[in-house]
Image (spheres, rainbow, N blue to C red):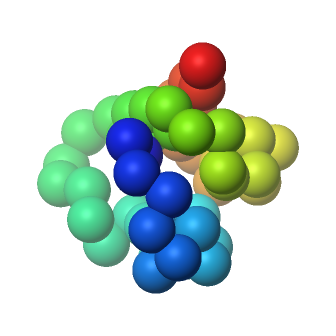
Amino acid sequence: MAVAHERFRRMQPDRLAALFGDGPRVLLDLKGELDCDACVSAGYRYWRL
């Protein structure tokens, strides 16, 4: 996520999954807006600046 749009900040990790295709889900949270632990628990490869 490179922009902190309210729409994406409010999304829970399970809702974000609908934006991904098959394969590993890699999430780059450049703004540091998402809950790291929740994303990792939901199976994302999570990285933030």
Q: Is residue 14 visible?
A: no
In the displayed structure image, the side of residue 30 where residue 34 appears, left or right: right
In the displayed structure image, the side of residue 11 where residue 22 appears, left or right: left
Q: Residue at x 60, y 19 (%)?
A: 49
What residue occupies the far left of the structure in this picture?
21
Q: Residue at x 31, y 72 (%)?
A: 18
Q: x, y (%) of residue 9?
A: 58, 68
Q: Is residue 14 above or below residue 21?
A: below
Residue 17: image quadrant is: bottom left
Q: x, y (%) of residue 40?
A: 69, 40
What residue occupies the far right of the structure in this picture?
37
Q: Is residue 27 visible?
A: yes
Q: x, y (%) of residue 4?
A: 50, 58
Q: Is residue 46 above or below residue 5?
A: above
Q: Residue at x 18, y 54 (%)?
A: 21
Q: How many marks?
A: 0
In the displayed structure image, the side of residue 27 where residue 47 appears, left or right: right
Q: x, y (%) of residue 27?
A: 44, 38
Q: Which of 25 and 1 lies nearest the eye of the viewer?
A: 1
In the displayed structure image, the side of residue 41 where residue 21 appears, left or right: left
Q: Residue at x 45, y 68 (%)?
A: 5
What residue occupies the far top of the structure in this picture?
49
Q: Which of 41 and 30 lies nearest the eye of the viewer?
A: 30
